[in-house]
Each structure stands twice: as structure tokens, then as C-alpha cells.
Amino acid sequence: MKKNLALLVLIIFLFLLPILVGKYLLYMTIHILLLSLFALGFNLLFGYTGLLSFGQAGFYAVGAYACAKVLLVVPSLLAGIFGGLVVAGVAALVLGILCIRHTRIYFSMLTLSFGMMIFSLAWKWRDMTGGDDGLVGIPRAPLEIPGLLKLNMTPMENYYYVVLIFSLLAIYLFHRLVNSPLGLTLRGIRDSETRAACVGISVVNYRLLSFTIAGVYAGLAGALLPPLENTVTPPVAHWSHSAEPVLATLLGGIYSFSGPIVGAFLFYIIKDIIVRFTEYWLICLGVIVLILVLGFRGGVVSIWERKGGQG
Amino acid sequence: METLAFQGLVGLSLAMYLWLLAAGLTIVFGVLGVLNFAHGSLFMLGAYFAFTFYGLWGVNFWLSIILSLLTVAVVGYLMERLFLRYIYHLDHAYQLLLTFGFILIFDDAVKMVWGGVAKIPAMPSFFEGTVSFWQRPFPIYNLFIIGAGILVALVLWLLFEKTWWGRIVRASASDREMASAIGVNIPILFTGVFVFGAMLGALGGALGTPVRVVAPGIGAAMIIQAFIITVIGGLGNLKGAFVGAIIVGVVSAYGILLFPVFELFLIFVIMAVVLMVKPQGLFGG
Amino acid sequence: MKKWLGIISLLFIFLVSVSTPALAQKAPAKKPAAKPLGVEVIKFGGMGIMSGPLSICGRVIMMGAQLAIEEINAKGGILGSKCELKFMDDELKPAVGVKNVRYLVNEWGANFILGVDSSGVAMAIGEIMPEMDRIYISTHASTDRLTEELVWRKGIKHIFRTTVPTYQEAILPAMIFKDFTHIKRWAGINCDYEYGYVSWSLFKETLKKYRPDVEFVASTWAPFWTMDFTPHISAALAANPDAIFSTPWGGEGVQLIRQALIMGAFDKIQLWWHPTGATTDFLEAVTSEVRADKFKGKLWVSGRYIHNWLQTPENKGFVERFVKRWAMYPFHPGQGAYDAVYFVKAALEKTRSLKTSEVIKALEGMELTTPAGHKYMRPEDHQAIYPTPAGRPVHDPAYPIAVVGDFKMVPAKEYFRHPPFEPIKISK
């Protein structure tokens, strides 16, 4: 009960945000929401299924570029967002089939290489992706349901609400997903692959499903980017971008539902604050990573849980 | 025809350089089971220290290389003893994450100590000059790198195949528990192997100082190539790393000459193909 | 649940503490500031690459801007308001550049944005300047598209540039080397991104106009973070060129030329055009080679500002002050940033207002005597017009490092492009 009340307060706070904070913080919050979705999907693969992917940025990029391409032709926000996440999902399915039979290090290396292949494609295929300049002039298209409504998205506040609603829906969906038999199955596979197989679970199929869903979430996060920034450039596919959901999840807590979200918030805030005062933000982040891996592998959420009793 | 052959030679020198980078990485994985994301940073530190000794303090070039190796050995020792050894029992993921944290730390640390600007020392005079291959001048320096790479390969082969220490290391790599049971001091061995791997990485970096700049981030830029090589060859397999390096180096060189559009792409495609067809790598098993 | 309560309170405290400065800025001042411009401090937000092989270029932007601001503040500021600089790292990533600009303008309160090395970053931040309602002055990013396309064609009036764009790399050499009749075969070793494509294409296009007999025999492409150029150099040399055209810059340029030297390139070819070679870091790296005449007079360099070219009192004073302040000889991103600040000062003294539209009008057509010579801010595309020569690195006993000498001058009017700016066809 208390938990639900707290959640309600948080959601109300988020809906009131544009009135409470300045433009930059609003912009930052949108980015935090995007990273939350990105990290949430990543953690389905890592925390719940036990597969560490270093190539999620590839699907983020596919979602972003696909959305951009759609918006440049059809200026409808919903078309862009759904177009982006569907294409990303398909890409995840296809690449997943190639990756999923491998485990551990080899899986990580394969995902890394596929992510970087997408990066190379984005950089080199000038005619399609704009090359290193990226796609520019992407409109923040109106939210349009033909015959029903057409909302102008030019003010950032309006777009913030779209992102917020998509994020809340996606998080809710994720919650249902991981608390369903699917979630339990994934955890079973993570904990013991052989035992799961013995019980008759197709390990490969479930892993593939997990991989695809992770790709869809990455693609959704990516698809929400172009209307915000009006440009998409190749670094969104680089492995250093893949590292962000990894770090965020590690920071927040790998084995908890809210870990990636908390971690996304903390990761973004920490980097943003540090960068204002010093150029040496890498070492701060690195030290935090060390501390977390050595002492707090459950992340920040686990620290809260230890203090407040069972979560 | 001569162009192709010459480009292949250029690719070979590139490859030997990459071999120096990948050798330490694959040894550490083979014995400790740790894929050290920060191996490229140790390479970068080797370059920085060599630059400092040779370029800033005017120490003899060869002595600078040795001193740089020793300094990085200390760094490697501290890394292993104070941090790495506490996570051997954990999932590979945490080792990747911890060593990734080290990349971030090292990149800023070198920036703090040496500044963020790229630096290069004066060229040692004995490296100037070329040798003619197919009527084209090939730098003596690149010949030296090829020689150094082959020498290191030979030394490593001798070390691991023919010496007592090598036998113990190989035994511990294939069965840690058994080795421990017959009296091998695993913790000390691990530290030793990690330091050894770090020194190999540093050697690669140090040998590059005459023609490459040192700058923060060059380690992270190289680590992906090192991964690709070790994966292609088979993680933990030295012969595989040697062959993998040659493949990557030569393919890069030919890519630049013949397929400039695809060059960036090619190496990742090769890694993906190898992983899908033979997941343990060409020589892994 | 306590966990959730804890998270929410954390969120709340954080956002309140961070947003308070923003709210405070929104609140009207208790009493009106006594300064004509209406603020106590004029804030300049700067950006550049601060890390990696190219970082000297970002750092020198900061140095140039900082020097100008210190000089101005020592003389009482701009109409009594002091100046302040905040410099951030754009990591060569357009997304980071955009984020930094939003932070600098919306959170920190920047009145002007200056700097940026990467053309990609400049193009990205240029696009959002109307939304930010701020002027951005480029001091290095050299794609002609920033001025030709964004200002001239798209009408984004908020962008200005104090340094010459790729006209320097591409058109200037064509004007000079068209008379080198023995040079017929050119090979290119170029950056595998916008800057490299544009420079090479523009060079080929221009040279072909004067010398239809010229051939472009090879072209290789090096992405960011290329450490080893030997395969590129050997690929270029394999085509037996008379001359090589190269765009890799900063530390990458240093590596390229070093590696080319040991490959005996300077024995094989007649000429090497390295347009980013007048930068201090490059000249420092090749000092001993220049002293020993390793380049055999074949290396030609240029820069958007060359510190020892103009012997005017403005320039000599500037170089002296820069060296004293930063222990380094200035080169163009730094000098461009220095000029950017002084252009703003001149504009503000004219408008006596920070209103963006008025400052834009004041900057258009402005002429300023700077250390780089007389700069005219052309109103059509907001590009500063001024000449810089090409030359060769030489050993001059008056300087501890190599400098540029053997200057060859071409009037700016002849090598700057003019409206209506035909789009450049990118060809590899």
C-alpha cells in the first residue's frame, strides 16, 4: 500500500515537472527517461536472463534512424515512434537468432561486434544515414491520430508528456512481463540452464524472446530521440553508448526491477553534475564502478533495501 | 602485383603491432579466465611511460622500453592484488565491468598527469632509413616491429612449451583445482601471469612511441581490435592470437588499398563470422 | 515502502537543489543592474575537444577566449560588465555538443556560444541556435556548409565564423599549385568524415578548372582514432603520385607526417600539402626534422592563422601576451576564439544591448583589426574574410620550435567562395 502511494506521488511529481523546473532540467529528464527504457530492456537480458550484451546501442540506433527516416517522410509522431521500435525489434530478432546460441564471453563479444557493425554502417552509408553528419532537420512531428486529435509538439513540454506517457506504459508493461511466468522462466534459465532444459523449457527460444524484447525497448528509447534533438548521428550506435545502460543498471541494481531506472537517473545526474565542475568525470565514474563491483553488486537499490528491510 | 605484396608487408607490420597488444590479453584470459577490458589502457601506459623516459627525460631508447615495462608491471601488480583477485569467483560480467571501470580511471589519470594533449618524442636516429622491397622503400622501423613481434612469439612459445614455469602455467590454465592440489601456489601464479600480460601490453605501447602519439583514450580505441583478434584466434590461445593478429592486420591493410568503403566494417564481420561458425575461435577448443 | 520513500526523497531533494539556481534566475532582480547592458557579467560558453589525439585544438580555443576575456576585464569589461568563460568538452559528438549548449544557455546563462572543432558538432549546435536565441561563433569547425548552407541558404542568422573554412585547405592550394606545372598526379590521404570529404572534393573541383591535365590517382580514408597511417601512405604511394594532399589534423596529422617521413615518402614525391601543418603542436613535433631538412623543402603547410606571418603591432603584441599566458605559440582555433570575443565586444559597444537580433545586425558587415589581420564579417553568410598564406616549415633561430616561412600569398577574395555558393559535389 505504502509502495503504491509513494509511486503515485512520484508519478504526480513527474506530471507536474514542467511547472517546477527550468528548460534544461526538463530536457535532462527526457533523457533520463530514455536511458531508463534503454537500461530496463538491457536488464531483461542481463539481470533476468543472465546475458551481458555490449551491443544494445545498435538497436537504439536502429530505432532512432528508423524513426527519423519515417518522420522525414510522414510527419506523424506516432508513425515515427512505432516505426522505430518495430524495425528495432525485427533487427533484434534477426541478430538474436545469430547470437543467442552462444554464451558468456562469446555472446558479449558477438553483441559488441554487431553493435559496432551497425555503427560502421551508420558512419559509412552516407546516402541512407547521412554518414558522420547524421540525419538532420527531423521534425518534432505532431502527435496525430487521424480523425481524433492533432497535438503540436513544438514546445518541449508537450513532447515531454508524450515521452513520459510512453515511458510509464512501457515500464508498466515491463513490470507485468517480469512478474509473469515468462519472467520466472527467464530467471530459471539464468540460474541454471541445465535445470531449465531438463524441465522442458526451450532455453534458446526464451533467450531469443528476451533478446528481442530488450531490442524493442532499446529501439523505443532510440525512436524517442529524433523528435527531441531533430538530429541522429552515428555515435548513438557506438559501444561506448552500449556501456551506458550497463553502467546505469550496475549503479542502480542488477537484480531489482527499479534498479535500471534508479541507475539511469543517478548515472545521468552524476555525469551532468561532475561535468559542470571538472573535465575529469571519467575517473569519478570509474571509481564508482569499482566500488559497486567490489562492494555493492546489488547497486544502490540494494543499499536501500539493506537499510529499509526487505524490498 | 608488387603493390599487393608490399601492402601485405605493411599489413604484416601492422599485424605484429596488434599481436603485441593481443598476446598479453589472451594469456591473461587463458590462465586467469579474466578478459581484461583495461588491457588497452596498460598498452597506453606503456606508451606514456616510454615517452616520459625517452622523450622527456632523455633516457636511452632501449632502457626506456625496459623501464616502461617495469613501471607498468607495478601498475599491473597493484591492479591484480588489490582489485582483480576479489572477483575471480564472480561471473565474467563483473570482471568485464571492473576492468571497464579501470579504463575510465586510467584515461583520466593520464590526462591529469601528462595533460590531455597528444605528445610524441623525437625520432631515434637508428630507426631512420628504409630497405627496398619490390623497388619500394620499407621503413627500418616497421621491419623492427615485425622482428620484435616474431621474437616475442618465439620467446613466448619457448617459455610456455619448453620451460618448467610454462608447464605450470599451462597446467593451471587447464585445471586450476588440480594444479592447486599438486602444490602450485595459484594466487602467486595469477599475480605473476597478470603482471606478465601487462608487461606484454606495455611493450606494444612502448615500441610505438617513435611514430605514434600518446594521448588519453588511445588504449580504449585499441581494445576492440585486441578483442577481435583474441576471439578470432580463440580466447586463451597464443597461436590463435598470432594468427588472428595477422588476419586483422593484413585485412586492414588490403581493405585500405582495395575496399576503402568497407574497411571499418570488415573486421567486425570477420569476428562475427568466426564466432558463428567456430565459436571457440580458429584455434580454440 | 521505505525504499521507494528513500528514492522519492532523493529525487525531490536533488531536483529542488539543482533547479533552485534556475528558479532564482527566473526571479526578477531586486534592483536593476547599473550596467548599460543590464547584466553584471557577460557569459561566454565555449566548447571544444578536450581529450584524445585532437585535444590540443579544443584546449587552445579555451586559451584564446580566456586571454581575450582577461584582457577585456583588465580594461573594465564590456561597457562595465565583466566577462566570464565556461568551457566544456564536446567529445567530438554532436549529441554532447547539443546537450552542452542547452546546459550553458538554459542553466548557466550563457549569452554567447563560441568554439567547436568538429564540423559535425558545429552543424548540430548551429541548428538549435534559433531555439536558444543565442549567437554561436565558430572558431575552428571548418565545413563550408556551416555558413553556406545554414546561414546563407537556411537563413539561420545566429551563426558566425571568425576563421576561414575549408577554402583554406582546398582552394588556396589549387590557386598556388596550379602554377606548379610539373605536378600532375595527386593522391589524397583524407579524414573519413565530412571535413575530409569536403576538402578533397573542393580541391579536386577547383584544381581541375585551372589544370584539366591533372589526375587524381589515389584516395584513402582514415577515420577518427587512426594511429597507424602506414597502410594509407603505402596505398597512396603505390599510385606514383607527384603530390599528396592530406587532411588529418592535430595529433593524427603529426603521426601521418612522421610515418610518411620514415616511409621515405619525401624522397618519392615532389610535394606534400598538409594544410593543418601550421599548428603549434605539429610544428613542435617536426622541429628536429625541419632543422635537419628531412622534408627537402617539399612539405607545404598552411593554417587559418600563422603567428609569425604578420609583423603588425597587433599581432606581435598578441603573440607575446599569448606565449606569456600559456607558454605556447598561438594557432588558429585559439586566435579565432580571441577574435570571437573581440567581435562580440565591438558589437555590444555598438548596440548597447544584449538582444540577439540587434547583436546579429551589428556583427553583419563588421570590420575588425585583429592579430590575424583585417577581418571583414561578410553579411551574406557571416563568414569572416581575411587572408592567410601557405608556406613551408623552416628553422628560424628566433623561435624554439619550427615556424612557417617561404610564404606564398593569395588575396582572400580570390580563394574564398562567394554567393550564390554552388553546392560542392562530394566525390571520393
Image (tube, rainbow, N blue to C red):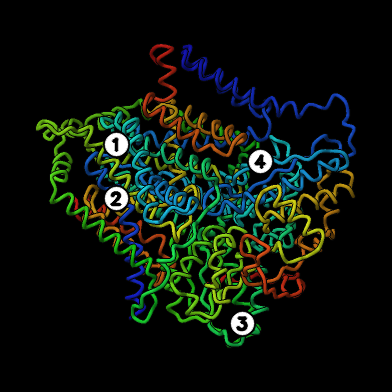
**Labelled pair 4, 1 in contact (Cβ < 8 Å):** no
**Amino acid type of disc 2?**
Leu
Give x and y (percent) for residue C295.
Answer: 54, 73
Marks 1/3: CA–CA distance = 58 Å
Give the chain letter at badge 2: A
Percent of width and height locating residue C371 = 77, 59
Marks 4/1 same chain: no
* Residue drawn at 76 percent across, 55 percent down: C318
Q: Tell me the element at label 3.
A: helix
Element type where label 4 sits in the image = helix
Q: Are marks 2 and 3 in contact (CB under 8 Å)?
A: no
Tag 1 subunit: B
List x then y, in percent, for residue C120.
59, 55
Q: Are marks 1 and 3 on the same chain?
A: no
For the residues marked 4 and 3, what is the alpha-carbon distance in whole angstroms? 43 Å
Task: Give the residue at mark 4.
Answer: C102
Q: Give the CA distance from mark 2 to mark 3.
A: 49 Å
User: Is residue A58 in view?
Assistant: no
Dot 2 falls on a residue whose secondary structure is helix
Q: Taking A208 as reference, is C357 left or right?
A: right
Dot 2 corresponds to which residue? A98
Chain letter, disc 4 residue: C
For label 1, the SS is helix
In the image, is residue A205 above or below residue C242? above
Q: Nearer the viewer, mark 4 or mark 3?
A: 3
Residue position for label 3: C208
